[in-house]
Image: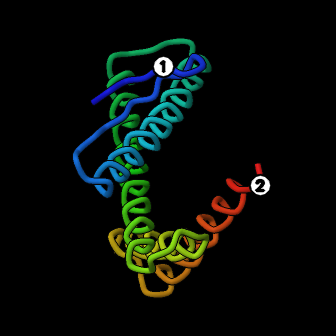
């Protein structure tokens, strides 16, 4: 692992010796960190509103941060891995990889959550749409 500091931002680089694994772990760490931070801010807001914190509430907050970070980090890792694999299979890097990767990730996550067939299809459509929109926005900003 190497750490670099650019423009006040710390960027963690992980090198596992394989581009696929590097991307999956990078996606997991980045999005998992964002999700854990979101949970931390939400929990801080609740503490401020209550005006007090207890050991039990603190432990609950830590568990929520870990759970959110692990869940969204895993979703991101699956998406990045699927999109990378689709690009390798197709032999090109374009918005279609994002669409296919998002759709497959939506379906996988939905199926893993024991949803019915209709919900899995809807989640696949949503995943594909969100990933495609994000891909288009990343080229126009």
29 vs 96: above or below = above
Q: Which mark is residue 96?
A: none
Residue 26 screen position, x and y as percent: 38, 44
Q: CA distance from mark 2 to mark 1?
A: 26 Å
Q: Which residue occupies 32% across, 70% down?
A: 112
Number of marks? 2
76 vs 89: above or below = above
Asked where in the image residue 128 lies, by quadrant, the reply is bottom right
Mark 2: secondary structure = loop
Residue 135 screen position, x and y as percent: 64, 61
Q: Which residue occupies 62% across, 20% down?
A: 49
12 vs 75: above or below = above
134 vs 5: above or below = below
Q: Residue furthest top?
A: 52
Drawn side of residue 21 relative to residue 36, left or right: left
Colour mapping: rainbow
Quadrant for the N terminus in the image: top left
Asked whether 92 or 108 is in front, the reply is 92
Drawn side of residue 10 relative to residue 48, left or right: left
Q: Which residue occupies 36% across, 34% down?
A: 13
Q: Which mark is residue 140?
A: 2
Q: Which mark is residue 5?
A: 1
For label 1, the crowd category at 10 Å Cα-Cα, with few meaning under 14, some 14 to 19 and many 20 or more, is few
Asked whether 22 or 126 is in front, the reply is 22
Residue 61 screen position, x and y as percent: 40, 29
Q: Which of the two discs, 2 and 1, labels the residue nearer the N terminus?
A: 1
Q: Which residue occupies 47% across, 22% down?
A: 10
For label 2, the crowd category at 10 Å Cα-Cα, with few meaning under 14, some 14 to 19 and many 20 or more, is few
């Amino acid at each position: 692992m190497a750490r670099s500091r650019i423009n006040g931002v710390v960027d963690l680089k992980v090198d596992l010796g394989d581009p696929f694994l590097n991307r999956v772990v990078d996606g997991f760490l980045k999005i998992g960190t964002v999700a854990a931070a979101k949970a931390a801010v939400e929990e801080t807001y609740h503490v401020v509103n209550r005006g007090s914190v207890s050991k039990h509430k603190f432990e609950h907050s830590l568990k929520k941060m870990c759970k959110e970070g692990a869940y969204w980090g895993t979703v991101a890792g699956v998406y990045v891995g699927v999109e990378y694999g689709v690009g390798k299979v197709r032999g090109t890097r374009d918005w279609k990889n994002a669409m296919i990767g998002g759709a497959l990730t939506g379906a996988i996550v939905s199926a893993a959550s024991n949803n019915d067939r209709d919900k899995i299809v809807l989640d696949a459509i949503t995943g594909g749409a969100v990933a495609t929109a994000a891909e288009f926005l990343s080229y126009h900003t």
